[in-house]
Image (cartoon, rainbow, N blue to C red):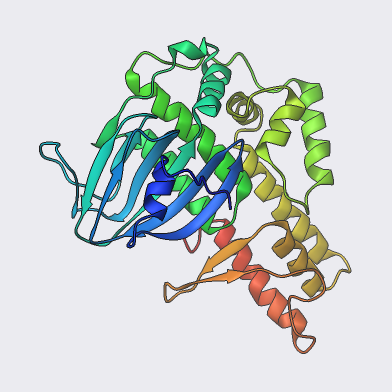
Amino acid sequence: MHRPTRSSTVFGALCASPSARVLHGMDLGFGCARTVWSNRQDRVAYRQPEGHTLSLYLHGGEGTRRVRRQGGRGHPGAVCLMPQGHSSEWEITCDFAFVHLYLPATELRRLFTESFDRDARLMVLPELTFGDAPSVATALSGLATALGAADLLGAEAALSDAVVAALMLDGTTRPRPIKGGLAPHLGRRMAEYIEAGMDQTLRLKDLATLAGMSTFHFQRAFRASHGVSPQDWILRRRIDRACTLLQGEAPIAQVAAYRMNAISLKLNEHDGQARSVSATAGSPFSQKNSDQEAQDVLTRMVFWEFGVYA
């Protein structure tokens, strides 16, 4: 997990806190990182922090206020945008959980230019405290979900969506209209690349690079051509592959191992408790009753992926 270490970052200030705790973290590349935190009974100050921070309150927050700001307290779904260099101080009196997306200034400018086809000097990330920004909240919530499922592809897609949504809050920034989907030869190239890497970690940035596009524009073009996002399309192809293997001669345990190696999952049990499922090929189940165990897990994996336990 990537962790900014300078004391002048928001991440560094939270690391120095005796109360803040890291629940999950993920390195998203190019200096970007995402962390889910919990905190309670604390007072945290960010003094002219380096880098930009996008924040979403996941649970609680009603006991959190920004010092020297009139009115307003946190709540689930509240969005905070903390641009580079903007100081703030926060008082926390109750338990709450929140997700932070950390973006170096250079990377945010690059994403701005790629997404909006505008000069980086025109970029404005507005400051926001306990704001109602549904598009940003949805993207950051997707980031938190992807982190819990160790879904790197989903996290990359959510990062792009969160950045674009945040930069559009100034009311003047809009992405250029999409002129069409992927060209036929690019569509074939994508299909071949995805099929060849079905049992490996697929990265959104690699797919976008292959298409010669930014991640944001690639997602839009892919959706225009296929009707779904790249991560949803890949997910369904993996399910189709597993079903095909089930219809063949491959042992069920081998099929389940393939699916478990293809992506990392968290399955929600009926009692609401989550447990991680991860394995390596050849050792996900005991030899005794392995096929039955594999069948049960594989069935639940398919249910989970179609949202039955969501």
In this picture, residue 43 sits left or right of residue 103:
left
* Position in image of residue 136 (x %, y %): 39, 35
The image quadrant that residue 285 belongs to is bottom right
Residue 289 drawn above or below residue 76: below
In this picture, residue 299 sits left or right of residue 34:
right
Q: Give me the residue at 21% from left, 61% from top.
A: 94
Residue 281 drawn above or below residue 166: below
In this picture, residue 177 sits left or right of residue 42:
right
* Position in image of residue 232 (x %, y %): 61, 44
* Position in image of residue 127 (x %, y %): 30, 28
Depth order, front residue of 2/45: 45
Depth order, front residue of 296/92: 92
Depth order, front residue of 85/30: 85
Task: Evaluate whether residue 248 shows in this view.
Answer: yes
* Position in image of residue 169 (x %, y %): 34, 24
Q: Give me the residue at 72% from left, 53% from top.
A: 238
Query: What is the total number of numbered labels drawn onto the structure image?
Result: 0
Task: Evaluate whether residue 131 shows in this view.
Answer: no
Residue 230 drawn above or below residue 44: above
